[in-house]
Image (tube, rainbow, N blue to C red):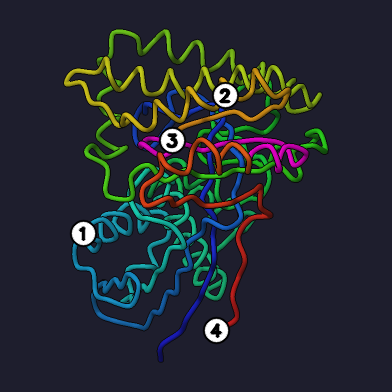
């Protein structure tokens, strides 16, 4: 008999970046992110008893066999934790509300949605002994490190750090006690490039192992995690702007100084960054930029700056976006289980 689970899970945008791994899916430094609202993946998982494990993956209603090896690897990595998962065949149907593989963390929303579906399966089997979301975060991490943060809403921390109680390399935790200004923080994603990235994030992480600035990067990230905890608690937006822009540029600087080097920013990415910085100086606001591992620019700002942000987009930025496209998003409440 076929059974089913369905979850909608959001992407997230890191403020302090996760870049580099030690061991298997363990972060070289802690990170913290905003969970988004409108950029999300909806995944339906169907399973039924079978003599051997098999998979069919559908993206936007069409069979996508190119995704299936990644899903097979993911299951091979989690079956030792939950051996009962080997006794089923699976059909996975997934859709995104945003362009895949373009630096808006589709792996975070996609793997977290799948992990939540799997936890629903395990819950039916009576195989979850720990917290449901903690288990989902751990499974999501195995599929994609940043996915560990997408199983919670608001601000989310992942990676062991002395300043964050109960923090772990195995799973993410919600960050509590942040200033109310961040309840309604906005993220407008300026789509400079909608296609697939030239270098995947997993390859980029690997290149940091022998990076000449790797050790220094991890030290800076750990210090920034301490700084941003105070910033998020106090609501100091001036310091937030300074820190998150530095983190974004450092991330891409590491890419450009890897061996081999690679550049994911495009000319319009740089033009947008410069226009945001100039506009902020001239208009007494807290509109800032950050970047994920791609060319698109996340424009972060408090709700009070919505009108100014729209003015900036309409007058300066829309012509720099691919076909004038951008996504209006904001901090979200986390995943939603969907009746099916």
The mark lying in front, picked from 1 and 3, is 3
Q: Name the residue under label 1.
A: 69
Q: Is mark 3 on a helix, strand or loop?
A: loop
The region drawn magenta spans 292-309
Q: Is mark 2 on a helix, strand or loop?
A: helix
> How far is disc 3 from disc 4 in space, using C-alphas?
33 Å
Q: Mark 4 points at which residue?
A: 340
The mark lying in front, picked from 3 and 4, is 3
- Counting residues from the start of the chain, the first of labels 1 and 3 encountered is 1
Taking the spot 25% from the left edge, 15% from the top edge, the residue there is: 210
> How far is disc 4 from disc 2 in space, using C-alphas?
40 Å
Asked if residue 298 is among those painted magenta in the image, a careful observer would answer yes
Residue 53 is drawn in which quadrant? bottom left
> How far is disc 1 from disc 2 in space, using C-alphas?
35 Å
Taking the spot 55% from the left edge, 53% from the top edge, the residue there is: 135
- Counting residues from the start of the chain, the first of labels 3 and 4 encountered is 3
Q: Name the residue under label 2.
A: 244
């Amino acid at each position: 008999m076929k059974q089913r689970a369905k979850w909608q899970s959001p992407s997230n945008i890191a403020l302090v970046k996760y870049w580099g791994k030690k061991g298997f899916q363990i972060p070289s430094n802690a990170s913290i992110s905003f969970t988004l609202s409108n950029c999300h993946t909806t995944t339906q998982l169907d399973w039924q008893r079978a003599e051997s494990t098999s998979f069919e993956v559908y993206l936007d209603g069409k069979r996508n066999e190119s995704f299936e090896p990644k899903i097979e690897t993911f299951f091979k990595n989690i079956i030792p934790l939950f051996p009962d998962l080997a006794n089923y065949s699976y059909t996975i149907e997934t859709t995104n509300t945003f362009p895949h593989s373009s630096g808006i963390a589709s792996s975070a929303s996609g793997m977290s949605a799948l992990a939540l579906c799997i936890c629903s399966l395990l819950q039916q089997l009576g195989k979850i002994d720990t917290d449901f979301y903690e288990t989902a975060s751990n499974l999501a991490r195995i599929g994609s490190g940043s996915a560990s943060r997408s199983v919670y809403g608001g601000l989310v921390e992942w990676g062991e750090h002395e300043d964050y109680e109960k923090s772990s390399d195995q799973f993410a935790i919600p960050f509590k006690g942040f200033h109310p200004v961040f309840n309604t923080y906005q993220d407008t994603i300026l789509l400079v490039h909608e296609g697939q990235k030239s270098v995947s994030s997993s390859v980029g992480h690997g290149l940091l192992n022998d990076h000449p600035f790797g050790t220094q990067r991890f030290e800076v990230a750990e210090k920034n995690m301490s700084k941003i905890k105070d910033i998020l608690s106090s609501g100091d937006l001036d310091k937030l702007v300074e820190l998150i822009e530095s983190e974004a540029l450092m991330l891409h600087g590491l890419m450009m100084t890897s061996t081999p080097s690679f550049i994911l920013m495009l000319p319009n990415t740089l033009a947008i960054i410069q226009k945001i910085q100039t506009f902020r100086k001239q208009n007494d606001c807290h509109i800032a930029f950050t970047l994920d591992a791609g060319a698109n620019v996340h424009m972060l700002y408090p709700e009070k700056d919505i009108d100014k942000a729209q003015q900036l987009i309409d007058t300066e930025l829309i012509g720099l976006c691919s076909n004038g496209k951008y996504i209006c998003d904001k901090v979200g409440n986390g995943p939603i289980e969907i009746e099916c």
